[in-house]
Amino acid sequence: MKQYDPKMHSTEHILNQTMVRMFNCGRSFSAHIEKKKSKVDYHFERDINSSEVDKIETKVNEVIKSGLEVREDFFNKEEAIKKFNLDKLPEDAGEEIRIIHIGDYDSCPCIGNHVKNTNEIGEFKIISTNYDSGILRIRFRLI
């Protein structure tokens, strides 16, 4: 299991699903998750404006405050391929794939640590964004 901070890692999942729902951009293709601050990169066509930053923060915080249960399920690889994108899993992930569910809001394959309930996370804040050559980077922290 990856040793990401459970609060930040669970927040990354919520942010990814929020970006998918708001912008139809897909989940982040790269992430650096740390306890104090984290960053995620998305394939995107532009930078986001301050109004969009506010909307993302509001939605992520609504999900966090809603007290969703975070649970895991296991699928055999053949079944998981039909339901989930397994591209980010390591080659040696094995035949049993762990899926993390954050309530009904997000489900994806993952090998990292997570909170048990979103109300453990705290408040999400975007520190900065920048855009370069088709990549949107979002830096965030928890307060």
Image: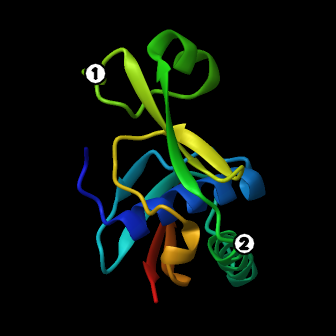
Q: Does residue 47 appear in the picture of this structure?
A: yes
- Above or below residue 130? Residue 31 is above
Badge 2: few (under 14), some or many (20 or more) residues near its Cα, within 10 Å? Answer: some
Residue at (54% x, 28% y) in the render: 85
Tell whether 94 sits left or right of 123: left
Q: Does residue 133 appear in the picture of this structure?
A: no
| The one of 64 and 133 positioned closer to us in this rendering | 64
- Going by the numbered disc 1, the residue's amino acid type is Glu
**Residue lying furthest top:** 78
Question: Could you say which disc has been placed on residue 126 in the image?
Answer: none
Residue at (34% x, 54% y) in the render: 113
| Residue tagged 2 | 59
- Above or below residue 2? Residue 120 is below
Ranked by sequence position, the earlier of labels 1 and 2 is: 2
In the image, residue 134 lies at what x, y percent? 53, 51
Residue at (49% x, 75% y) in the render: 120
Q: Quadrant of the N terminus?
A: top left
Residue at (59% x, 60% y) in the render: 14
| The one of 93 and 130 positioned closer to us in this rendering | 93
- Above or below residue 100? Residue 57 is below
| Residue tagged 1 | 91
- Going by the numbered disc 2, the residue's amino acid type is Lys
Query: Which element type, helix, strand or loop, lies under badge 1?
Result: loop
- Above or below residue 140? Residue 73 is above
In the image, residue 111 lies at what x, y percent? 34, 41
Cα distance between the residues tagged 1 and 2? 33 Å
| The one of 138 and 105 positioned closer to us in this rendering | 105
Tell whether 30 sits left or right of 21: left
Query: Which element type, helix, strand or loop, lies under badge 2?
Result: helix
